[in-house]
Image (spheres, grey):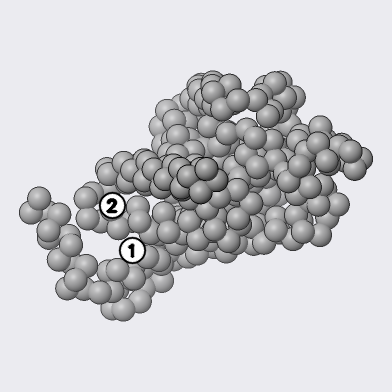
Amino acid sequence: MDQILFNIGLLIEYPMVNLKIVIDGVMIGALFALAAYGLALVWGVMNVKNLAQGDFVIAGGYTSWFLVKTGWLQSIGISSNIVALIGVPVAFGVMAAIGWVIYKLIITRVIERDLFTSLLATFGLAIMMAQIMNLLFGSDTQSLKLDYETLYFADGLIDVPIAKLIGVCMAAGLALAVILFMKNSRMGQAIRATSQDSRAARVMGIDTEKVYAFTFSLNAAICGAAGAIIVMVWLIQPFYGITYSVRAFVVVTAAGLGNLPGVIAAGLGIGAAEQYGGHIFGIGYQQAIAVTLLLIVLFFRLLQQRRKRQALN
């Protein structure tokens, strides 16, 4: 308890520490929002609650890490830092292909099914992916240590690693590209139409089966790119997927389906909340904070539904 009070006192005595925590929260929250947007797509369009969301993120991280560490990308003669950045689009493409295969083998059987079936199938998928990654890459944590410098502000109280800053910019760029695709492309319009009413979309001539396959592949690709960014600035491990799945569910549940500004705001807010919780209670409690936030969001969603039912009665 004394340590907790001491940590709170630091926030009051040194206001700049709050700014550092918020900056760190925004950096990791941007990646939470990116993964959560993919989950919102799959959930809203296909009614699939994907518990393997975080495992797709970790798989994307391992894809980039493997290509860089084995020298496959470095053989083209570019510096290791630039090669690491090339790993992001590579992971995007590889995970899109993997997502399409998984869709054909597993997801087609749970589209628009009940909640229990969807959760059970994707939970099994998450376990399978984690075990495969454990067999292929081992259980040790991995990361790409890039030789970027760190920027210091406020007499060294605030530090911003350039690698993390690049990662946030890449996440923002990818999110913007997905938004423009969804608004301006024919497939993006078909996805939005299918999410609103799949039966009406079929009547209008939209191939919903093709839309479903593309949506799940796009989600896997987004997760893959997010994982490739994460491995440049944080650690990955085969069984870390659940941590990102929980956070993605918190973000989507808090923001609501189809609410992209809400997804971004919720992702950044949860990132900041976790950083504050880690500072006050200790790093080991960050995951507990994410679970607590999920329970709180579910509780308030339940209250909202009850109020709507009472209003209708």
Position of 122 with respect to 209 (left or right) is left
Decide: few, some or many residues near mark 2? Use Cα within 10 Å; few <14, some 14-19, many ≥20: some
In depth, the one of 51 and 155 nearer the eye is 51
Amino acid at dot 2: Gly
Residue 245: give x, y in percent of width and height. Answer: 49, 38
In depth, the one of 96 and 198 nearer the eye is 198
Q: Quadrant of residue 288?
A: top left
At 27% across and 48% down in the image, what residue appears? 283
The disc placed on residue 278 is 2
The disc placed on residue 157 is none
Q: Quadrant of residue 75?
A: top right
Position of 231 with respect to 174 (left or right) is left
At 60% across and 55% down in the image, what residue appears? 259
Residue 179: give x, y in percent of width and height. Answer: 70, 58
At 69% across and 35% down in the image, what residue appears? 46
The disc placed on residue 21 is 1
Residue 203: give x, y in percent of width and height. Answer: 89, 38
